[in-house]
Amino acid sequence: MREVLVLGATGTTGSRVAAALTSQGVPVRAATRTPREPAQVRFDWADRDTHKVALDGAAAVYLVAPIGAA
């Protein structure tokens, strides 16, 4: 099974989604602006250089766009 990328995985909803997926045996790639653990990947909406690395190989993405993003 391929990974699901969870953007904002250290936030309120993202952490809950990541935990629920993990409990169901779904591999999760946790994305955050400030990774603090080896399994986390950096993703910042304002830094396009972080997008490709985070998305590479992900089968699906959970995201909540930041306020004001189109």
Image (cartoon, rainbow, N blue to C red):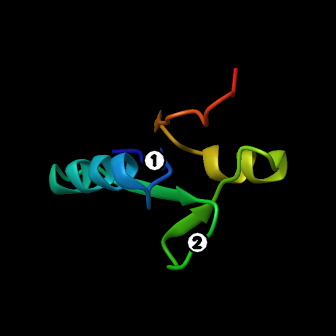
In the depicted structure, whether residue 23 falls above or below residue 48? below
Which mark is on residue 6? 1
Q: How many marks?
A: 2
Q: Position of residue 63 (x, y in %)?
A: 49, 36
Q: What residue lies at 39% left-to-right and 49% top-to-bottom?
A: 14
59, above or below 34, in the image: above
Find residue 54 and report its horizontal and vertical position in percent. Answer: 63, 51
Q: Gap between marks 2 and 1, in whole Å?
A: 13 Å
Q: Nearer the viewer, residue 54 or 33?
A: 33
Amino acid under disc 2: Pro
Left or right: residue 60 compared with residue 68: left
Farthest residue to the front: give it: 68
Residue at 35% over, 46% down: 13
Left or right: 17 with respect to 23? right
The local crowd at label 2, few if under 14, some if 14 to 19, many if 20 or more residues have their Cα within 10 Å, is some
Q: Which quadrant is home to the C terminus?
A: top right
Q: Which residue is mark 2?
A: 35
Q: Which of the pair 70/68 is nearer the observer?
A: 68
> Image check: 28 left or right of 37?
left
Question: From this viewpoint, which residue is outermost toward the left?
Answer: 24
Q: Looking at the rendering, in which quadrant would you find the N terminus?
A: top left
Where residue 6 sits in the image (x, y, percent)?
45, 47
Residue closer to the observer: 29 or 62:
62
Q: Position of residue 47 (x, y in %)?
A: 81, 50
Dot 1 lies on which element?
strand
Say which element carries label 2: loop
Identity of the residue drawn at 64% across and 61% down: 33
Q: Give the amino acid type for the residue marked by disc 1 in the picture.
A: Val
Where on the picture, by quarter, is residue 41?
Answer: bottom right
Q: Residue at x 61, y 37 (%)?
A: 66
